[in-house]
Image: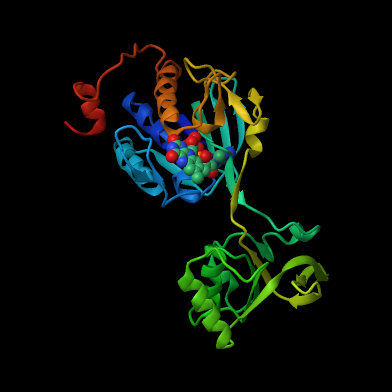
Amino acid sequence: HDGPIETDAVIVGAGPVGLFQVFELGLLEIKAHVIDSLGYPGGQCVELYPDKPIYDIPAVPVCTGQELTDNLLKQIEPFGATFHFGQEVTEVRPQDDGRFYVETSRGTRFLTRTIFIAAGVGAFQPRTLKVDGLEKFEGSQVFYRVKNPADFAGKNLVIVGGGDSALDWTLQFAQEGPNRAESVILLHRRDGFKAAPASVAKMHELCDAHEMQFSVGQVTGYEEKDGKLTGVKVTGSDGVTRLMPLDVLLVFFGLSPKLGPIAQWGLDIERKQLKVDTEKFSTNVPGIFAVGDINTYPGKKKLILSGFHECALAAFAAAPFIFPEKKIHLQYTTTSPKLHKVLGVE
Ligand code: FAD
């Protein structure tokens, strides 16, 4: 159907705290939709430190960022949350009937009774190449992510960056295969990479075999003809600027978090954080809660364990919005038959 998705709860952000919010809502029999601008769950844990050990999760002596995320996903499985990845929540608007209208950058729409903002340090978005005017080619000839590699097959590509994404796509397009480009130039500001050594070695091998080129330099300008981008001006380490002709420019500068549209939803903000109380973790708008790194209150510590506690209290505070008639009692997962039923462990 074409109308908005009607639901009891929308969680903005699939970081560790957004994931645990699913659990705490689930115990109270509240189903949730979870949205993240990234293409996968885990937030900072997966985007910034998937392989680093975390030592301060209660009763988990050590686990990596990725392991924590995997375990949270397993823990929330019984609650059947619906995930919407690769889209940013752009709009939140209160409705006359007390619900909220929520819309994402991909046009997914919701009508929800409650919202849990677990947006951490903001939506992770690709860092852009800062060259005046270049933005008008975004989506036609300049790209910060590859959705469909076949779109670039047979083209003359310039790929900018020195991390794993830049190297992985370079190898994909420069080598024999269905998506092979006409030509590939990898451009990086220095002759040193933050990528898997095997990929770097393979790239040098392809250069030696004249299958592609590697160039040290930075994009400082561009040329266009009849509204089409025809080449980029590249300033090399020798200070000389040269023209590099191309069909498509692919830029992989990594992701950085941006608070973005959250600032426009009419919520009290203090130094890029949402102000909440410590009883309900409610924002100034009843029905909109904020948990995890995105919120602030006296004594706030940006720790995962604090976020988990906030989820529990926010869920209890949200229940009256969804079940106004129902009295909600605290129950133990150890002994409550009702919780065993919702957890599917009868
Ligand atoms: P995040 O993990 O930031 O997740 C927020 C998610 O929301 C992101 O995926 C983002 O893309 C998404 N989002 C934001 N805005 C929108 C929007 N408008 N639409 C859609 N999606 C949106 N903490 C500890 O407790 N112990 C540690 O040992 C520890 N080590 C750390 C090491 C490093 C290197 C770093 C950087 C942090 C560490 N932290 C640690 C902090 C911990 O990672 C954060 O406290 C935690 O990730 C916060 O979780 P969160 O779910 O609130 O936010």
The answer to which of 342 and 52 lies nearer the viewer is 52
Q: Residue at horizontal 62%, vertical 65%?
A: 161
Point out the residue furthest to the left here.
346
Q: Is residue 112 above or below residue 151?
A: above
Number of numbered callouts drawn = 0
**Depicted 135 relative to depicted 297: above or below:** below
Question: Toward which corner of the image does residue 16 lie, by quadrant?
Answer: top left
Residue 311: tell me if it is visible. Answer: yes
Tell whether 296 sits left or right of 32: right
Point out residue 7 in the picture as x, y percentages from the top left corner.
45, 31
Left or right of 323: which side holds 124? right
Name the foreground residue: 52 vs 234: 52
Residue 312 pos. (x, y %): 39, 23
Rendering coords of residue 260 (x, y %): 65, 39
The quarter of the image holding the C terminus is: top left
Residue 261 percent coordinates (x, y):
65, 37
Position of residue 235 relative to residue 121, above or below, is below
Q: Is residue 36 visible?
A: no
Residue 131 location, quadrant: bottom right
| Residue at image location 31% in from the left, 13% down from the top | 329
Colour option used: rainbow
